[in-house]
Amino acid sequence: MIKKVKFVSPILFLFIGISCSQNTTQPIILTTFEQQTFVAKVIRIIDGDTMEVLYEETPIKIRLAHIDCPEKRGKQPFGNQAKIALSDLCFGQNVTIYGENYDRYNRLIAVIVNENKQQVNQELVKQGMAWHFKKYSTNQTYHQLELEARKSRIGLWKDANPIAPWKWRKNNTL
């Protein structure tokens, strides 16, 4: 009996070269995008800090490194605006992706640079559409950008009492 596999995540592996012949078989070389830099087209914006890109006909889910945006699911204030901000910065563009590692959902954690040479992750913090995600990042640039956005009351910092996404998720069990 043959079982069908419904889905195998293309994020995990890229088959770089498989060559088979009657006399020789080369080993399969598996590559992840961890610690890799590559260019791909943004084909989908999932929420303020998650997108999908197309690389050599393979869709790859990307979670933006260093930041956490308000939740679109569960209707957290500014969740939809964060998604729109991310879309405005890079949807449909060929972006440069600086892969770092993978999260527990097999999304590539990465820094994205758009066609205007803007670092998208930082731009979202500058626009007040994201928190510096200090649980996973010690990068002081993001910390400083968040402080500046707070001081200027930009984006979500207009709210008198903005709730961090990690607290929102905990309280709203998404």
Image (spheres, rainbow, N blue to C red):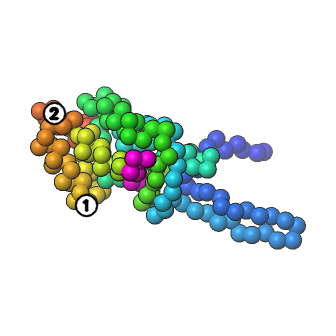
Instruction: Residue 54 in the image: state x and y as whole percent.
Output: 55, 45
Q: Quadrant of residue 29?
A: bottom right
Residue furthest to the right in view is: 22
Question: Which numbered mark, 2 or 1, is in the foreground of this view?
Answer: 2
Is residue 22 positioned above or below 146 on the image?
below
Residue 141 drawn in magenta: no
Q: Is residue 154 left or right of residue 70?
A: left
Amino acid under disc 2: Lys
Say if residue 170 shows up in the picture. no
Identify the residue under disc 2. 158
Q: Which circle marks residue 138 in the picture?
A: 1
Left or right of 145 on screen, residue 95: right
CA neighbours of label 2 inside 10 A, class few (<14), some (14 to 19), many (20+): some
Instruction: Tell me where residue 20 appears, x and y as whole percent.
Output: 80, 64
The answer to whether the residues at label 2 and label 1 have Cβ atoms under 8 Å apart is no
Quadrant in the picture for residue 73 = top left
Q: Position of residue 2 (x, y in %)?
A: 76, 45
Give amino acid for label 1: Thr
Mark yes or no: residue 48 visible. Answer: yes
Q: How many marks?
A: 2
Q: Residue furthest front?
A: 116
- Relative to 32, 172 lies left or right: left
The residue sitting at 30% across, 56% down in the picture is 136
Q: Which residues, given as a range, are shown in magenta?
A: 109-117
> Between marks 2 and 1, how big is the CA–CA gap?
25 Å
